[in-house]
Image (cartoon, coloured by chain):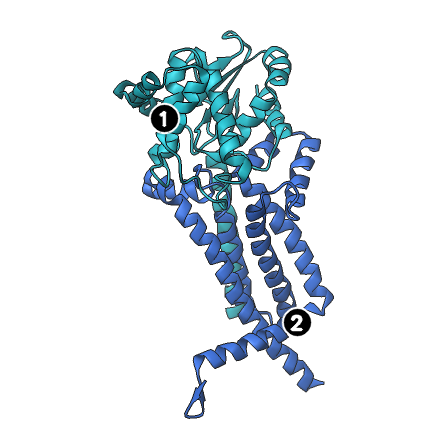
Chain colours: A blue, B cyan
Amino acid sequence: MTSGGKKSWLDKWLEGLGLAFTGLKSAMRTRRFWGFFVLTFIIFGTLLNLLGGGTASFSLLAVSGFGGKMKIILDAFLGLFGIGQFFLDWLVVFVVTFLQATLIGAIGVAWKRNKDQESLQSSGIVAGLAILGSGCPTCGTALITPILATIFSTGGYAIAGVISRVITLLSVIVALFALYKVGNGLNGCRLNLKEKK
Amino acid sequence: MKQAGKIVRIVGLVVVSVAVLMLIILSAATKPSSGDKVWDSRTTVGSLNAKNYYVQYTDLACPYCSVFSRNLMDNFEEFKRDYIEGKDILYEVRVTDFLYEYGEHKTGMSRWGAAGTYCATQEDKFWEYYHAALKSLWKDYHSKGIGVSKESPMIEDMTKDYWVKIGEKVGFDKAEFASCMDSGETVEAIQKNTAKAAKSANGMPYFVFNKFVSSGFDNNWGWDYVKEYLDAGLRAN
């Protein structure tokens, strides 16, 4: 949709989306991307699954023997593939982990090309939000609850559920927005490299 | 110079994030045992003079509590043989209406569950009622994926009558049991217990197994993890 030869914001956005896809696709052809992707997917996904029951896993990890520790970590890792998980719980963790891994993979490539630090900050925000959204807000064991309880006293428990869901959703939105930005940056780099050749 | 400033900001952000996460974990997981004494011997299993003392705070509206309790119930004979008798443990269950008092929604389920349990306890039928309630919740909701986690569909049709019917199954008179659940004495006792629990518990379930203190339980865990908890308590003595 254009008026007077100028592109509308929707056209610009769609164009940017196409460019971001092209940029991300070019990054996915590199080994660097997949190195960062796999590492982030495993570490971040396992961490999110460990936080699924609030701080319970960490309490157990602190007192378990070596075998026990390995079992807890392995179960959290296997949970990434839906093993022993409720479908909806798994889906949320998988989507957030996949987006974060893609983002870190893309940033890994962008960092090499143009030292993009703003995107690195975005990935930190995504990780922080996703982690804060973990746990069971209904039971008061979500990680956000102690913070809210400190600010709002016991009233914090009452809003933990809503806030926990909102920040999980926010983590997905921030990740998508950051991917859009990094993808565009990567596409710019790709064109620059072509010109240099 | 500008580059260095940005790197310092990123490092600072990471350090602060890690520090906040550690604070949350420490504050949630390492509250000291308060030298608890038995609240009600009718909700215990094991000798009152046992060497090890385990307390489980729970709420019947909390799905993660139900997973732990159901695993314990399904393996009750093994639990009694290997832990209660084998390891000399006194195990106490403290049912609260924590989610009613502090939760997101003022759901009656938490209060009714606690009231039903309290009334059954007064007639020394705590374990019968508690286990019947866990079985009912499993059959009617949790086995169907309802009310099992934060992402699952919520239990929408819960009524007080649900808990009265559990009382009937255990052998109580319907009208008397319903009247007990509504009485001021019952509500007062539950509120008092929940307020006491909230002094140490951040959320439900909350465990004080000797010196091992933990909050929460993963809804994907089974009996093997319950045993990890029980063993952790023994190691922490």
Return the chain for callout 2.
A
Give the quadrant of residue B83.
top right
Numbered-mark total: 2
Q: Which mark is residue A25?
A: 2
Q: Amino acid at mark 1?
A: Thr
Please state the horizontal and vertical placement of residue A52, each as a whole percent of the image: 55, 42
Please state the horizontal and vertical placement of residue B215, each as a whole percent of the image: 49, 32
Residue B203 falls left or right of residue A85: left
Please state the horizontal and vertical placement of residue A187, each as a whole percent of the image: 61, 77
**Pick the front one: A39 or B160:** B160
Residue B34 visible somewhere in the drawing: no
Element on which disc 1 rests: helix
Report the residue marked by disc 1. B194
Return the chain for callout 1.
B
Q: Quadrant of the C terminus of chain A?
A: bottom right
Q: Amino acid at mark 2?
A: Lys
**Pick the front one: B194 or A38:** B194
